Amino acid sequence: MEYKFNLGLYSGVFAVPDCVVDNYIKIATGDNLKILLYSLRHCGQDLSAGEISRATGVPPDNVITSLEFWKQQSLFMESAKPEQPSSVSATASTASISANFGTVPHNSLSQAEKARQLLKHDYEFSPSEITDLIKNSEKTDYLYKRAEELYGRLLKPHEQSTLAVIVEQIGMRAEVAVMLLEYCFSIGKKRTNNIKDTAQSWLELGIDSVESAESHLKQLKEYHSIESELVRLLKIKDIPDKYKPLFQKWLFEFNFPVQIIYDAYQITLEETGKLRYNYLDKILCNWNENGIRAKKKGSGVVTKETAPVTAPSFDLDELDKQIMEENKKGLKYGI
């Protein structure tokens, strides 16, 4: 008598890498996952977008979008193929794609990058999902009620989804999300994109508790009270959002008074002929490293110990050269 294993459904299986679930399960759309599963089933084969579309029922345009999504995550790569004749349409001659899982680390995305992807992705929660979220948490329920109070109306679907992404997908505490929402409304930034950007900023700053949020909001309140004075002294209409972190660094990390920022601004004008934020930052970083807390007219300065010393020796020409080199490398300061 002969015996054999009765594997049933398991007689034909294929593997799904851990990183797909760990990093992308919340980011990927239904079409993304369909394309991924079909491609995994045929791993090692060159697959065209047309073939995948016919097999999965996903429209060709969505197939291409999904393939591009997985390429951006480094899970797919284009296979080199001979050029198609020019008479072939773009849809018919789509580049073949091969799976590229061997080169992807298990935890290839940082927490901040995961949050950025989730906030960037326009995932729409269904009404039943929103209802379940609210029912399962009193704090989340309060978040939605507070949001309706701030908007002065019922929330629109995309506004409901934005809050759901923040508390459910990226894991911000509902009570912290309430504070974030109130702050955004207080400064007139109540669009969902503004709220998402602020949530991303808070996550990158490690704001994950009521205490840390309160501390950050106190600092922001101090900054906003000073900002108008800085705008007046620097003779500008406003401070661009992307440079505000620089001013917050000078004021709260370096603990510089407004006057020393103005002094550095005067030197920037003398040396460059205009306000250059990166140049201004280099001067203030140098002064911070040298312990300068205030600058007097003339050559004298005052250090942390308030003992008068000679002006620090740094070559502004050399400083300018360094800044130009950094600018060429694409030095940027984000929000």
Image (spheres, grey):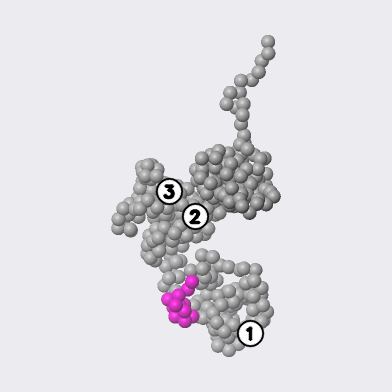
Sequence-first disc among 1 and 2: 2
> What residue did someone put label 3 on?
124
Decide: few, some or many residues near mark 1? Use Cα within 10 Å; few <14, some 14-19, many ≥20.
Answer: few
Q: Is residue 63 visible?
A: yes
The residue that label 2 is drawn on is 120
Q: Is residue 138 above or below residue 207?
A: above
- Three-letter code, disc 1: Thr
Question: Which residue is at a point 67% across and 52% down the rendered structure image?
Answer: 83
Label number found at residue 310:
1
User: Is 74 positioned to the left or the right of 259 in the image?
Assistant: right
**Is 244 drawn above or below residue 39 in the view shown?**
below
Residue 15: percent from left, percent from top: 62, 36
Disc 3: CA contacts within 10 A as few (<14), some (14-19) or many (>=20): some
Quarter of the figure that contains the N terminus: top right
| Disc on the earlier residue, 1 or 3 | 3
**Considering the numbered disc 1 on the image, is that residue within a helix, a strand or a loop?**
strand
For the residues bearing labels 1 and 3, Cβ distance under 8 angstroms: no
Residue at coordinates 66% horizontally, 75% vertically from top-left?
A: 322
View extreme (top): residue = 1
> Distance of mark 2 from mark 3, alpha carbons?
12 Å
Q: Which residues are magenta?
A: 228-240
Q: Residue at x 41, y 46 (%)?
A: 125
Q: Residues within 10 Å of mark 2 (few under 14, many from 20)?
A: some
Q: Secondary structure at mark 3?
A: loop
Residue at far left of view: 152
As measured in the structure, the alpha-carbon distance from the residue carrying label 1 to the one carrying label 2 is 51 Å
